Amino acid sequence: MRSFGFVRHRGIALGIVGWLSLVTYFTWGADSALFRFVWHHHVPVLDQMRVWPRLNIVLVPAIACLFALAFSFFVSVVRSARERWTRETIVFIAICATLAVLVLAIQIFMRWNDITDGYWDHWFEVFVVYRLPRTFFPVMTVLAATGVLVAVLLARRWRLSNWPKALAAMIWTLSIFDLFYISNTQWAIWPTDVGVRRERDAFASLVSFAEPRGLEGSLANPFARHHSTGLLEGWGFIRHAQFYLQYFDADYGFARRDIPQDQVTAARRFFGVDQSGKRLFLTSRIDYTTPVDFMADVDASVASGDATIEIAFFDGDTLRLNVGNPRAAWLSYIDNWDANWTATVDGRDVVIERLFGSYKSIRVPRGRSTVVFSYRPGLLPSVAK
């Protein structure tokens, strides 16, 4: 740690702050020139962020700092081994060898017993362009452990004056080889593919808003027309999950057998799974406990003949509507509520209420009005009450 010094610590801190600022600016969506450029052009790395959880890339600077400290320690071990073996050298070799054997044993056991994670089964063995052999990972474990141990064991025989650079080159070579194969074979469709670009353009248009949704669990791909309301394990959306699971199963979106068919049909309409794909509704109330009662109110509003909802603009973060209604009503947008969503009616801020505890509803006046839903994430995470 002392070798880093105050100046280097300050540089690392400023670098992390700069990186966090860049990623935060990227998350501003339509208000970010960087995001707009990435959205319409193929930009390596950034163009791969098709789902927002991948923004955990903000951890990269911290991982880089940890790697730098580990490399500094490794260099000190090799430097010590070049002069004489100490107790610390022997302990280091023993720990590295033990960890390598343990990891290799676990990998072989999992490979032998065909133990895989669902993410692997779905993305690496089904949709990859070139199937990724499972033996790749044990091989990389052996190569990495061999490289580290050989560097220490043969340190005295090294005659290179710039041997720290040689160590860095060895580690970089192994890392690039390790990452290159996975990063270039995981996806079945490349970002430059025409089909992907068409889906991207479709999302920016109103077409994607009118397509029926699905009930199966799938990744939230903003370039796809057919969105899914299904559940993804570990992705949150607790309020949505609580309501959704009253009518459908978590894995495939099958209707629960203990729920009456009329409730299931109403729930499918509510989520936009039916052919109409609607997810915007006008009702006289929002304090319903079942989708059957809610959709009956929707049908009553439609039967009046004068209620209209026209989508003027939609880009994922902003939804602008022209609403007409012969009487004051509730406008419900079947999309998850979040504290960072705001709404205005004719330019005036209104409170977004939660329909069924999870979805957005606002009060609109009689007559014609312009409604805007906007999502603007804050710098700090919000805590829903």
Image (cartoon, rainbow, N blue to C red):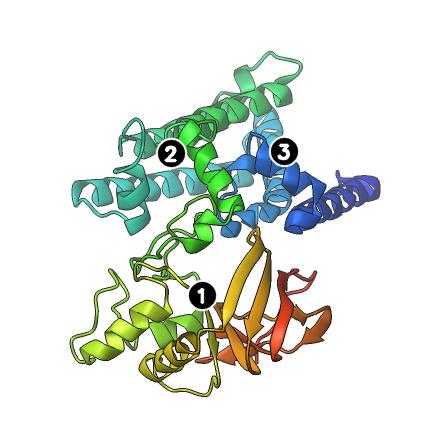
**Any part of residue 223 in sight:** yes
Where 37 sits versus 51, above or below?
A: above
- Residue 243 on image: x %, y %: 37, 76
Q: Which amino acid type is shown beneath numbered disc 2?
A: Trp
**Separation of disc 1 and disc 3 at Cα?**
44 Å
**Any part of residue 342 in sight:** no
Labels 1 and 2: the sequence-earlier one: 2
- Residue 217 on image: x %, y %: 32, 57
Q: Which mark is residue 187?
A: 2
Q: Is residue 113 left or right of residue 245?
A: left
Q: Residues within 10 Å of mark 3 (few under 14, many from 20)?
A: some
Q: Residues within 10 Å of mark 1 (few under 14, many from 20)?
A: few
Quickly name the residue at label 1: 236
Quadrant (top left/top right/bottom left/bottom right) for the N terminus: top right
Mark 1 falls on what kind of element?
loop
Where 341 sits versus 49, above or below?
A: below
Which residue is more in the foreground, 149 or 272? 272
Residue lying farthest right? 7
Labels 2 and 3: the sequence-earlier one: 3
**Separation of disc 2 and disc 3 at Cα?**
40 Å
Q: Which amino acid type is shown beneath numbered disc 3?
A: Ser
Residue lying farthest top? 159
Q: Which amino acid type is shown beneath numbered disc 1?
A: Gly
Q: Nearer the viewer, mark 1 or mark 3?
A: 1
**Separation of disc 1 and disc 2 at Cα?**
25 Å
Residue at position x 65%, y 35% from top? 37
Total labels: the figure holds 3
Q: Is residue 83 left or right of residue 305?
A: right
Quickly name the residue at label 3: 76
Mark 3 falls on what kind of element?
helix
